[in-house]
Image (cartoon, rainbow, N blue to C red):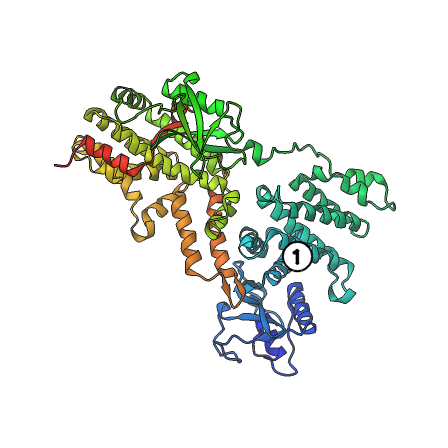
């Protein structure tokens, strides 16, 4: 394809260019595009015509979606761009040269490309402070957000660090880059790094590649301050975002003697009034399962550094057994038994226990047989019946929100693309999924361990009201779990119990079930959830299903190029997490809860064996 046609595709100039005709450039953006064309020409690149479109324009205007630019290097496509129209309305006046003013609002987004070229395009397309707030700026920020959320799919963190250092230090146009252009390039790299660190700080904090990268980048920026004083603001922002107090030696180690040490002291990596956050390793909370029989456990929230004696104390209080009679045993994954001493840490690596935890009597017998000791089971169930349903829903929502508010959008990307090796990056997400399963099993356990028909009816009425309250409190994840627990086969088959449920509760339950209807791709849930104000907790399994559908229905690579269109769809989906976590209007989701209710909800007794649950159901209402 000739260069005049390449320019025509680049600027959407109409009518078609002829030899000797003039291309009208409307603004600085068009000049930058022309410079890009010239640079690509020097690098031996050329434009290719879209195979589905003819070379000449027809009398009808060509749609933006049809205009694609293919960039080749050494005979291979390295970047595919597609022209889109800005959402900003075009001015009505036309230019003197006859070109349509709407061309000014055209811009190019990435369809596919190599990781390096995608990053280069995003840096070129990036807008700085003076351009923030414009429509193009918002669109550019969205594409940058797409890249930062999904880059682990096609690029390691180490490779990204090296590429960013290369862009910051590169000398473009063979030394002909002027000072203003160099400053803009460096500021764009620093802006991208700031966005990256701000967005993914929890994942990057312990990454050795990122630590080395930040040291090197700070050294380069400090060295550039003499030539580019405007970088002072950017380096301060970097220091604050990444809490670079740990690199305080950088300024003194690399500061040249040409400047006063006062400046470097001011720019040194000082506290700036920020207290360093504790590492995730020390402050992280986990869900701990302590089995009291072979098929039932107590679920409890604990710090990652919890010791064996603390768990024993909780179990002893919950089961009303003297702590001195109990020991904690870890059944390892190889089948061995490890007796934990009182001060032994249960989570040595802060994410996984040493094994499946069992509390036994000192004679290694079970603490409780939940299927024969009916007097105790009746007392335990009666405790739930005495609790206020709104307070129970508040405690459940507060519990879920602590985990949901810790979920990062990127966790869903890691979970979808790297299910077998992503546990280090998906801790909060897995805890929330685990909690959803636990609440469903808890509902089944409570109903099926209630031997008296009248109390079982009261219990189901309680759960229907709790589900309604969870929906009102915008905790849809827990709402779904309760409804699914009541609809489980072992519970729904209890016909004698359901016949005793009053009509108004059956009607309420039917209305609540409507929201869980999976027909039309869960349309009822999606419509209802969209109307809810933030903050709110979505149904996480369905969100993961949506992402998996996008992942499995679209190739990640096309002809060795990253399918950025697919990654944009995934990023757009995972951004729902961010939207649900934000509280712009002060509509806080957490409320003050009763201490008694919290003590009950924080330590749920759960049977996790489906066969055991169904046997309990058969015992309550045998088949005719």
**Residue 99 visible in the snapshot:** no
Q: Residue 357: in sight, yes or no?
A: yes
Q: Nearer the viewer, residue 76 or 519?
A: 76
Image quarter hosting the N terminus: bottom right
Is residue 206 placed above or below 383 in the rendered structure?
below
The residue sitting at the right extreme is 258
Where is residue 174 shown, x and y percent of the image? Answer: 76, 67
Residue 136 image-quadrant placement: bottom right
Q: Is residue 3 above or below residue 119?
A: below
Residue sitting farthest toward the bottom? 19
Residue 500: x and y in percent read 17, 30
Relative to 124, say whether 400 is above or below: above
| Picture residue at 76% right of the left edge, 63% below the top | 177
Q: Residue, x 33% and y 50% (percent of image)?
A: 523
- The local secondary structure at tag 1 comes to helix
User: Residue 421: percent from the left, percent from the top?
Assistant: 50, 48
In the figure, is residue 421 to the left or right of 487?
right
Which residue is at the far left? Answer: 624
**Residue at image mark 1:** 163
Residue 255 in which image quadrant: top right
Quarter of the picture containing the C terminus is top left
| Residue sitting nearer the eye, 114 or 397 | 114
Relative image position of residue 318 (x, y in whole percent): 38, 21
- Toward the viewer: 230 or 144? 144
Q: Is residue 582 above or below residue 391?
A: below
């Amino acid at each position: 394809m000739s260069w005049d046609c390449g320019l025509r595709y680049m600027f959407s100039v109409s009518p078609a260019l002829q030899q000797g005709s003039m291309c009208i450039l409307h603004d600085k953006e068009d000049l930058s595009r022309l410079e890009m064309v010239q640079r690509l020409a020097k690098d031996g690149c050329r434009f290719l015509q879209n195979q589905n479109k003819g070379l000449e324009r027809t009398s009808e205007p060509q749609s933006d979606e049809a205009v694609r630019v293919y960039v080749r290097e050494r005979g291979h496509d390295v970047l595919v761009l597609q022209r889109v129209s800005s959402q900003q309305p075009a001015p009505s006046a036309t230019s003197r040269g006859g070109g349509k003013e709407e061309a000014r609002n055209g811009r190019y987004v990435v369809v596919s490309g190599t990781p390096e070229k995608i990053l280069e395009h995003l840096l070129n397309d990036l807008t700085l402070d003076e351009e923030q707030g414009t429509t193009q700026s918002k669109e550019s920020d969205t594409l940058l957000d797409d890249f930062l959320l999904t880059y682990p799919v096609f690029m390691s963190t180490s490779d990204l660090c090296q590429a960013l250092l290369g862009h910051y230090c590169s000398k473009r146009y063979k030394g002909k880059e002027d000072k203003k252009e160099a400053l803009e390039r460096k500021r764009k790299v620093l802006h991208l790094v700031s966005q990256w660190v701000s967005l993914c700080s929890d994942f990057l904090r312990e990454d050795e590649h990122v630590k080395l990268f930040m040291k090197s980048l700070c050294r380069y920026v400090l060295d550039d301050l003499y030539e580019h004083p405007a970088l002072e603001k950017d380096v301060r922002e970097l220091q604050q975002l990444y809490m670079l107090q740990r690199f305080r030696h950088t300024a003194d180690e690399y500061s040249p003697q040409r400047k006063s040490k006062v400046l470097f002291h001011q720019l040194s990596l000082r506290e700036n009034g920020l207290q360093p956050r504790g590492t995730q390793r020390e402050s992280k909370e986990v869900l701990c399962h302590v089995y009291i029989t072979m098929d039932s456990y107590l679920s409890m929230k604990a710090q990652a550094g919890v010791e064996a004696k603390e768990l024993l104390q909780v179990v002893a209080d919950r089961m009303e057994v003297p702590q001195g009679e109990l020991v904690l045993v870890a059944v390892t994954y190889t089948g061995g038994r490890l007796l934990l001493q009182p001060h032994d840490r249960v989570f040595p690596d802060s994410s996984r226990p040493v094994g499946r935890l069992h509390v036994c009597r000192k004679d290694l017998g079970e603490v409780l047989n939940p299927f024969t000791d009916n007097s105790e089971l009746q007392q335990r169930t009666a405790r739930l019946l005495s609790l206020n349903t709104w307070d129970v829903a508040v405690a459940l929502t507060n519990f879920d929100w602590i985990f949901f508010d810790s979920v990062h959008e990127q966790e869903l990307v890691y979970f979808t693309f790297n299910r077998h090796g992503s546990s280090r990056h998906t801790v909060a997400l897995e805890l929330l999924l685990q909690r959803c399963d636990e609440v469903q099993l808890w509902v089944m356990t409570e109903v099926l361990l209630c031997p008296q028909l009248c109390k079982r009816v009261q219990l189901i009425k309680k759960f229907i009201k709790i589900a309604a309250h969870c929906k009102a409190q915008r905790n849809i994840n827990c709402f779904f779990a309760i409804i699914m627990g009541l609809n489980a086969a072992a519970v729904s088959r209890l016909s004698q119990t359901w016949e005793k449920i009053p009509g108004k509760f059956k009607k309420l339950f039917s209305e609540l079930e409507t929201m869980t209807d999976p027909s039309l791709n869960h349309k009822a849930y999606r419509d209802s959830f969209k109307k809810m104000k933030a903050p709110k907790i979505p149904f996480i399994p369905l969100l993961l299903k949506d992402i998996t559908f996008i992942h499995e229905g679209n190739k990640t690579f096309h002809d060795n190029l990253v399918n950025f269109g697919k990654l944009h769809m995934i990023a757009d989906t995972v951004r729902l997490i961010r939207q649900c976590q934000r509280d712009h209007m002060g509509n806080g989701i957490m409320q003050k809860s009763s201490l008694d209710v919290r003590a009950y909800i924080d330590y749920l007794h759960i049977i996790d064996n489906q066969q055991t649950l169904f046997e309990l159901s058969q015992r309550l209402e045998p088949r005719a």
